[in-house]
Image (cartoon, rainbow, N blue to C red):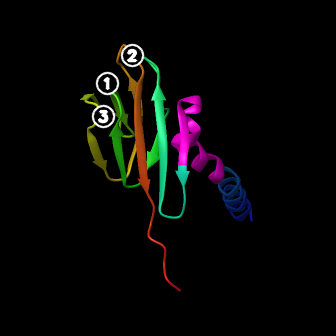
Amino acid sequence: MKRSTALIACMAAAVVLAPLSGAAQDLATTGGDSVKVLLDNDKVRVLELQMPPGGKTGVHSHGDNLVYFVTDGEAAQTNADGTSKTMQRKAGEVLWSGPVTHDTQNVSKKSVKTLVIELKEPAKTP
């Protein structure tokens, strides 16, 4: 009986905490005032990210996405597995990425601006 009670308690905690962990992984949430949702529909979501020098996005996840670099910049990116890399990007550059969980920091001496275009699953026909 103790085992089933513990199992029920764990399942209840998972149901309660699951929405919080999902929200915490969303760039629109973790990025704070640096992120603005420009478009969100059933096909795509477009986020504008404007980070000051030293600014961080917080750990977040994306599905398939494109990143358009509006300004030049340098970023340090740390993946969920702990690996990291520093990237130099030029204005007008476009980057494709599959699903990823990471944190990005602006290591430039100036603010940087990017557009993140997150693709959504195609709508199913009935």
Indicate which label's residue lies in the foreground, 2 or 3: 2
Picture residue at 41% right of the left edge, 49% below the top: 117
The residue wearing badge 2 is 110
Indicate which label's residue lies in the foreground, 1 or 3: 1
**64 falls in the magenta region:** no
Q: Splitting the image into 4 quarters, where does residue 33 fall?
A: top right
The spot of residue 101 in percent (x, y) is 41, 44
Q: Splitting the image into 4 quarters, where does residue 108 fall?
A: top left
15 in relation to 124, above or below: above
The residue wearing badge 1 is 73
Q: Are marks 2 and 1 in contact (CB under 8 Å)?
A: yes
- CA gap, disc 2 and disc 1: 8 Å
Q: Splitting the image into 4 quarters, where does residue 114 fall?
A: top left
The quarter in which the N terminus is drawn is bottom right
The spot of residue 90 in percent (x, y) is 25, 30
Categorize mark 1 by other alpha carbons within 10 Å: few (<14), some (14-19), many (20+).
many
**37 falls in the magenta region:** yes
* Mark 2 or mark 1, earlier in chain: 1
- Which amino acid lies under the numbered mark 3 shown in the image of this protein? Thr
- CA gap, disc 2 and disc 3: 25 Å
For residue 16, side relative to residue 95 (left or right): right
Label 2 residue SS: loop
Residue 102 in view, yes or no: no
Categorize mark 3 by other alpha carbons within 10 Å: few (<14), some (14-19), many (20+).
few
* Mark 2 or mark 3, earlier in chain: 3
- CA gap, disc 1 and disc 3: 20 Å
| Residue stretch in magenta | 18-38
